[in-house]
Amino acid sequence: MEKSNCGMNEQNNMKWWQLSLFGVGCTIGTGFFLGSSLAIRMAGPSILIAFILAAFGTYFVFDALSKMTAKDPQKGAFRSYAKKAYGRWAGFSSGWVYWCSEMLIMGSQMTALSIFSRFWFPKVPLWMFATDYAILGLVVLLIGVQILNKVENFLAILKIAAILLFIVIAALALFGVIDGGGRTLRIPNTAAEFFPKGFNGLWSSVIFAFYAFGGIEILGLMATRLKDPKEAPKAGKVMLMTLTNIYILSIGLAVAITAWSSFNGKESPFIIALDQFHLSFVPHLFNGALIIAGFSTMAASLFAITSILVTLAEEGDAPAIFSKKGKLQIPIPALLLTIAGITASIITALVMPNQIYEYLTTAAGLMLLYNWIFILASSRKILKLEAKEKMMYLIGAAFILLAVIGTLFHDSSRPGFFISLLFLAIIGGVTWMMHFRWKNKEALKPQPT
């Protein structure tokens, strides 16, 4: 494979712990800081089970991806492995499913950042904030991967620090050091208290737990920049262990000090949980954490969609102009398409009714999970799997399917499921037409005599 021109041509000198920290920075975002609140509302205290299932499912997917990376590092990561395992159609469809879903999610990320920013500047229009964040994200992307890595590592530390601060405050409240207005510790004593919305409530919430772990595919793209790609599995294990401990502890404390019915989808569960303690600095602190989280995941997504677009172009699955080298770190046509996509995504997010746009972003999130299933399927063709690994990856696929099917049991998630199928049908139709084009090109090639 040719070397990418995507501005990602720095030396492969990343250490495994840097990749772990980068992964934490890419992963902890609005999906956790906001989505977990809605998940608690759906499942109550049993949301902890959903996060445990999602942690195992995510680990199995990254284990497969990291082992393929260690064996055969590829810039295109998961889509390159899909192509190698099942043919050109698989790489084409996997790449475009990911590109479309990430581009669509980008609009919601920038809209969320704008809403958070209006907490401090309520009179500034949303579109101005969205534009500013988009420009700042593009600047980070143009500077290059080394800067992106440093930015993500720094922001990861800030996000972890904010969550740890919540854990400390919540723990002090549990031991009575901080006055919580006479509120008591809420530990479920019966199955009905642990599963207040029943099994269906838990099932519907699993998708939001998976959202909180979204971002491992970006690690697959970055893993090729390790000094030793064989250290990718170790980096993933440390990253996922860190995330799981942070998520379980913080969510567990949140539902322990606050009634689960108090949570909603418009505020962070941490702000809701700490509001009872009347700490004036907390809303500002966590609003800053939300902005940091949203921007870091947005910057990582920009890297991912640009990298995927360039490798699609290099391998003939997108117009070759998108991989044409220029004076900038990124091919100018690829940059222009990314800017056009971001602009369209911002306009769509700001113009469309909130509920309809929520359906589209839910669909985009589901499409990311479809790619995770493709990662597990590709590993069966590329790796020589032992019986234990085969079982692990089957369980991982089952957990993902469990999350996907669970969207059918909740009114706000169900439309997104069907929209995701529509996106798949469109991309599948294009892939089917391209298949005949590839076949005709192959037939026109001169045959060896």
Image (cartoon, rainbow, N blue to C red):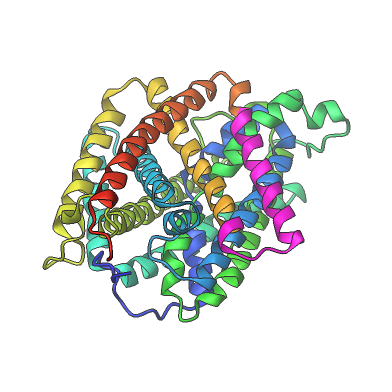
- Is residue 70 in view? yes
Q: Position of residue 372 (x, y in %)?
A: 54, 48
Residue at the image position 53 percent from the left and 72 percent from the top: 70
- Is residue 276 in view? no
Answer with the quarter of the image where residue 430 lies.
top left
Q: Position of residue 143 (x, y in %)?
A: 24, 67
Residue 172 as seen in the image, left or right of residue 419: right
Residue at the image position 73 percent from the left and 36 percent from the top: 45
Q: Nearer the viewer, residue 68 or 231?
A: 68
Q: Position of residue 415 (x, y in %)?
A: 49, 21
Answer with the quarter of the image where residue 256 lies.
top right
| Position above or below: 347 against 60 | above
Farthest residue, direction right:
190
Residue 354 as seen in the image, left or right of residue 370: left
Q: Nearer the viewer, residue 385 or 184?
A: 385
Residue at the image position 51 percent from the left and 27 percent from the top: 417
| Position above or below: 30 against 445 | above
Quadrant, the N terminus: bottom left
Residue at the image position 58 percent from the left and 27 percent from the top: 407
Quadrant, the C terminus: bottom left
Q: Position of residue 166 (x, y in %)?
A: 60, 51
Q: How many numbered marks appear?
A: 0
| Position above or below: 15 against 278 | below
Q: Which residues are magenta?
A: 380-406
Residue 28 as seen in the image, left or right of residue 92: right
Q: Nearer the viewer, residue 133 or 343?
A: 343
Q: What kind of secondary structure does the magenta stretch mostly adopt? A: helix
Residue 179 as seen in the image, left or right of residue 347: right
